[in-house]
Amino acid sequence: MAAPEQDTIAAIATAAGRGSLAGLRLSGPGAFASLSRLLPKDRKLSSFLPRRSSLTWLCDLSGNRLDQVTVICYPAPHSYTGEDVVEIFCHGGNLAPALILEQLCAAGCRLAEPGEFTRRAVFHHKLDLIQAESIAEIVAAESPAHLQHVLSHLEGAFSRQVRELRQRLLHSCALLELGLDFSEEDVEFADRAQLHSELTQLEVMITRLLAGFERGQALREGWKLAIIGKPNVGKSSLMNALLRHDRVIVSPIPGTTRDTVEERIRLGGHLFRLIDTAGIRQHGDALEQIGIARSRRAAQEADIIVFVTDGAAAADHEDEDIAAACRARAASGSLLGILHISNKADLPASPQAFQFEAGGVATIRTSATTGAGIEALENALVGLVSAHAAADKSGVGYVNLRQRLCLEKARAALHAAEKSLHDNLSAEFIAVDLREVIYQLGALIGEVTSEDILGEIFANFCIGK
Ligand code: GDP
């Protein structure tokens, strides 16, 4: 990684707008000198103890007061970035922080780019790339479950495992390559049987991590929950009841919901994306047919299906058809579960109402009108996700897209190495592929990386991070 320029960067690290406090950050060799130029004449930089908060006035370069602030100085290397860092907490609002930032720039700093503080932290080995990415995710997290997961990445459990695996491979590869130097004498230093067992273990681990990608998406963006069923059974009303406001138009005319509608809710610490779909019907006008196709797709892509029927009306073949589609979807795997909702419980129940005859599918009686059974539905949804989380043995957590690409390349190289080993090829073929695995694992944690990739990662950060 290229060295950061030897300049000092400054940014407002808190969100813009009115608030009681705002925070600014400086990092770089000139951080203390820049602060010093904004101090009142009678205040010496030496009066600020490292990592202790001190109250002081800050003034512009002409000596006019800007604000009374608290300042913390972190001398290198014991700081977030590994460089000299100053954190300033001033009064909030739009003016005081902006004026201080302007004067800091006049005193020798330059404005930081998005993620530049964290990028410097990675450069100085304060964080690896996985930890840096987890910091951006903490800022973006919208559910406690997501936050908990990201905190474990920040803590470094994932990185440690990758580093350990990489270390083991480096050792095996070194032995293989040592053997190459003595190839005339027909000596091999690497134990091929042991290498084979190591590669197998590594593959299991990589495959497990890759399987966690979809689940990581669900944590980040919410579990996709498709509410499906015939028109007029109360899907939109149920969605409104879950959201506790009227987001979706409810009407007694079948086929009112022509498009899929998406809203997010948080239940029991988990984030859900509710997708209300157009009623699945065999007939209907052309526009409605498009809606029906979207319903099927939503069910196909969903993590959880909520299948709604009218408990006050006799079931018909359309209910059966949708139930069959649900079963087929469940059989294809990767579905957390199906919940059958028998709605309109406030009306007299029909003896011919639809019964879901499939193992393990709970039926919940609800009334979207009175709210009866909505809490039971919410509990069942949380139960499905919690049961999944408890059963998930991936341990180290879920990977993001960049991490997935590295892992996929590592796995492909691993396969090639295993094949060469299996075909009893000479050590140099195996070593080439192992080097690629080592490279990709290094890229995963940021030990080897390119400027392009770093640019892409840090462009998504907030300024001041
Ligand atoms: P969708 O087509 O499945 O989305 O159904 P809607 O939510 O648009 O509801 C269709 C009709 O059923 C509307 O007139 C709703 O007021 C009514 N409805 C929905 N849920 C209930 C319920 O639990 N009880 C009663 N009595 N009517 C309901």
Image (cartoon, rainbow, N blue to C red):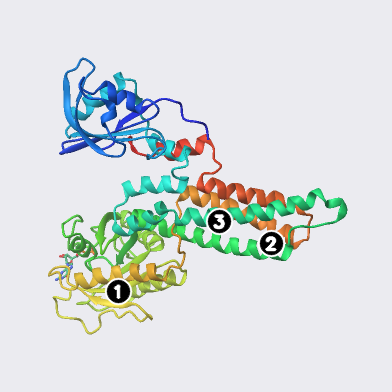
Q: Which residue is mark 2?
A: 195
Mark 2–mark 1 contact, CB under 8 Å? no
Instruction: Specify whether 371 is left or right of 37.
Output: left
Q: Which residue is mark 1?
A: 340
Position of residue 184 measured from the top left corner of the image (x, y, whole percent):
87, 51
Which corner quadrant of the image does residue 317 belong to?
A: bottom left
Q: CA distance from mark 3 to mark 1?
A: 46 Å
Residue 274 visible: no
Instruction: Count the marks.
Output: 3
* Identity, as a three-letter code, of the amino acid under mark 3: Glu
Q: Secondary structure at mark 1?
A: strand
Q: CA distance from mark 2 to mark 3?
A: 15 Å
Quadrant location of the C terminus in the rendered image: top left
Position of residue 288 measured from the top left corner of the image (x, y, whole percent):
31, 57
Q: Nearer the viewer, residue 302 or 167?
A: 167
* Identity, as a three-letter code, of the amino acid under mark 1: His
Instruction: Specify whether 71 is left or right of 178.
Output: left
The circle drawn on residue 164 is 3
